[in-house]
Image: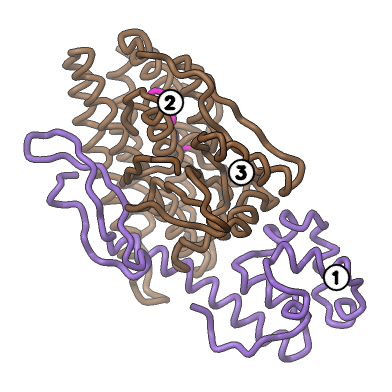
Chain colours: A brown, B purple
Amino acid sequence: MQEFQHDHFAHCESGVMSLLLRHHGLEISEAMVFGLSGALMFAYIPFIKMGGMPLIGYRSMPKAIIKGLQKRIGVRMKLQTFSTPEKGSKKLDMLLEKGQVVGAQTSVFWLPYFPDEMRFHFNGHNLIVYAREKDEYLISDPVFENPVRCKTDDLEKARFVKGVMAPKGLLYYPEHVPDSIDYFRVIPEAIRKNAKTMLKTPVPIAGIRGIRALAKSIAALPRKDDRYARLFLGHIVRMQEEIGTGGAGFRFIYASFLQESAGILDDPVLDTASRKMTDVGDEWRQFAMLIAKAIRSKRGKKIDFEQISGKLQDVAASEADIYRLLLQ
Amino acid sequence: MKDEHVPQHDISTYANNKKAMYAVDRNGDYTRIASSGWNVEETVTKQALEELIRLTDHAHKEVLAGRKSPLFFHMYDRRMDLHTLAQSTGLYKWRIKRHFIPTVFTGLSRKLLQRYAEALGISVNRLTALPRHEGQQ
């Protein structure tokens, strides 16, 4: 049976890529995967709804890490989707038989090893299948502490749900892995690109402008129904803290990436930026605490939306400062 | 966040699992730490779960009263809404809404019922009946 070294990471997609590349001999941390692929983001898209709530993202779209990293460090990934579940399962079994360790996109709701409390309809969950034993797959899911098992039928269902971000059975694995990474070239490139996206995005719903737009929507909540207002606030924090963000909507992972980069490039500015990003992460967590307090308050009790909105405006300002520093 | 501030609140919504968090140690170096959860996260996850239960309970009453078909209950029971169900079946929302009408639902073809059952991950038999409901987990 295939040997595989599992590890516990914050985020599924960056965790999977770190594990896959390590398996193929390239040591690369989750934070480095996250940073180099330019995955840090903010997007608030009021007109795309998920479960009745607007889309709020603290990172780039699913698959952006796999594809971003591929472009950045010259790893070549084989990505394949399938027209039918039968074809998708057959291919997976064939790859496992050949000893390949395979990344897969799945829906959280259909994975029985997730506890009920965490099962929502989210189709962008990544994991690694490293072996099959009879009617079970052996899975390294980086957001779990230990390897897990999943019945073959269940995994097939989870790989072939339809809907937003439908995985279509997506499987992926590296076809070519570079021996080393030219960090002196790729780190500054990735950091500059990410900072620019966050600061200078032309649309008012992404980057720093997106954070400010969300703050405005919060300030406008008193005009909405009380139940909706509370659910909306809770939704923001869920997107920020639930399942695999490493805390504070990926800001701490990015701070870790900046710190690792500072060491490699011996660049004190990156060290400063890392410390500031940690502070911003703490601010995001204070923002989440304000919301939790508001939600726990009795129904009918007035929520101080101005205060919550103001806190988010402060977060936007502090985060913008870091990107300006990084672009100097 | 400092490592000693990584919350270890053993929150119910982690169901004894731990998640990896990034935090700095006393030298200021980043490390990964397994967290048993933060009560802030528990509050918002529970809020979302309670909303799902509220919708499911309400749907159960509607079906029991004969105002809606069992499909309406099963949709919420499987943590979906009209939008998700439309996407996972590939059917138009207006069509699904029609199938919420009890008399229309009883006339559906086996094939269409199969399509719903598959999207919801339940059997056709289960789909066409209203189970006893003691409130969802």
Q: Would you say residue A40 sits in the magenta stretch?
A: yes
Is residue A307 in sight in this rendering?
A: no
Within 10 Å of the Cα at label 1, are there few (<14), some (14-19), or many (20+) other Cα atoms? some
The residue at which mark 3 appears reads as A93
Are tags 3 and 2 found on a single chain?
Answer: yes
In the displayed structure, A236 sits above or below A78; it is: below
Amino acid type indicated by mark 2: Gly
Residue matched to label 2: A38
The percent position of residue A280, horizontal first and vertical second, equals: 26, 38
Q: CA distance from mark 1 to mark 3?
A: 41 Å
Q: What's drawn in magenta, residue-wise?
A: A36-42
User: Percent x, y for residue B27?
Assistant: 7, 34
- The disc numbered 2 marks a residue on which chain? A
Q: At numbered mark 3, what does the secondary structure look like: helix, strand or loop?
A: helix
Give the residue at mark 1.
Answer: B98
Residue B86 image position (x, y, % from top left): 75, 58
For badge 1, the amino acid type reads: Arg
CA distance separating discs 2 and 1: 45 Å
Res. A307 image quadrant: bottom left
How packed mark 2 is, by other alpha carbons closer than 10 Å (few <14, some 14-19, many 20 or more), is many
